[in-house]
Amino acid sequence: MTTTPRTHHIGMIVPSSNRTMETELPAMLRAREQADPADRFVFHSARARMRHVTPDELRAMNAQAERAAAELADVRPDIVTTACLVAIMAQGPGYHCTAEDAISAALRAEGSNAPVISSAGALLSGITALGARRVAILTPYLKPLTQAVADYLQDAGIEVVDTLSLEVPDNLAVARLDPAGLLTRYRDLDLTRADALVLSACVQMPSLPAIQAVENEAGIPVLSAATATVHRILTTLGLDPHVPGAGRLLGGAAA
């Protein structure tokens, strides 16, 4: 007898110029559907205006999150995830908790009880799931924003042993970066003391095609804001966080 797949509705709060969150997250969950047909994933997005990755535009985008959450509440999602990791981390240590609480309140006000996760909080929990205490990070940001990400991680007890900033402020230009370039750019990082490598600390910078290849070559776990977000989506929904070919975090070996 054929079993009807369980359908999970994923709500996403997406920066208006983001082209990657709605590409990489569905790609990973489609791969999981192929591996485990018992679950099916449907995606619903609400957008918040942001074109340039600057402190002012990031703050303005954060201010739109509650409006976007109210719109998503109408489809009664099973979970809501908010992206733009740096928009949250640039506001100071622990801000992902504040942002998640505000979005949760907006959903509750509209009758939705969906749990809320953020890519910022997901990256922290993904690193923890790997048992990593020291990481190197690669970002598309200008150096001051990369430093804000490093400070955020270090405040959470994760040592950042090295960083690499590609310094691309235009968010559409970030989306056009070729993930194949990461196969060589990551070698500019000193991984001597790193327990894990964050290959893209940004849900806009494409990295999924490079994750497994870099992990195989580097010999340490490799994750991204996107793979960490998928891990958190699956674990929050009570599902096995397994996606083929997406690194150790989604390979079934992480805690």
Image (spheres, helix red, strand yellow):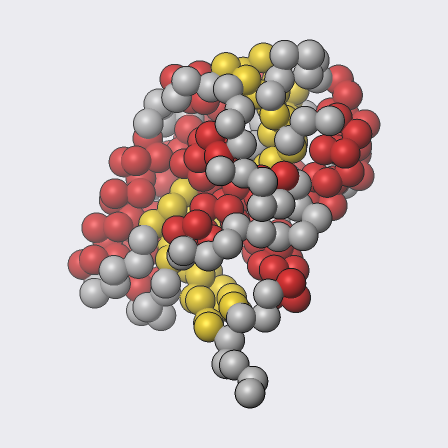
Depth order, front residue of 16/246: 246
Q: Which residue is at a point 53% across and 24% down the rendered structure image?
A: 132
As rendered, which of 42 and 244 lies closer to the eye? 244
Kindly indicate the quadrant of the structure image that contains residue 77. Answer: bottom left
Whether residue 71 is visible, yes or no, is no
One can see residue 65 in this view: yes
Q: Quadrant of residue 175?
A: top right
Query: Compared to 178, does 157 lie above or below?
Result: above
- Residue positioned 41% across, 36% down in the render: 121
> Farthest left residue?
109
| Residue that sits furthest to the front in the current view | 1
- From the top left corner, tell me how far across and down residue 189 is, in percent: 70, 17
Asked if 22 appears above or below 102 in the picture, the reply is below
Residue 212: where, in percent of width, then height?
Answer: 73, 40
Q: Looking at the picture, does residue 153 appear above or below residue 126?
A: above
Horizontal placement of 51 versus 211: left or right? left
In-front residue for pair 247/16: 247
Residue 78 x %, y %: 37, 63
Residue 100, quarter of the rendered image = top left
Q: Residue furthest bottom?
A: 1
Q: Quadrant of the N terminus?
A: bottom right
> Does 150 sit left or right of 63 as displayed?
right
Q: Is residue 214 left or right of residue 168?
A: right
Q: Residue at x 63, y 26 (%)?
A: 197
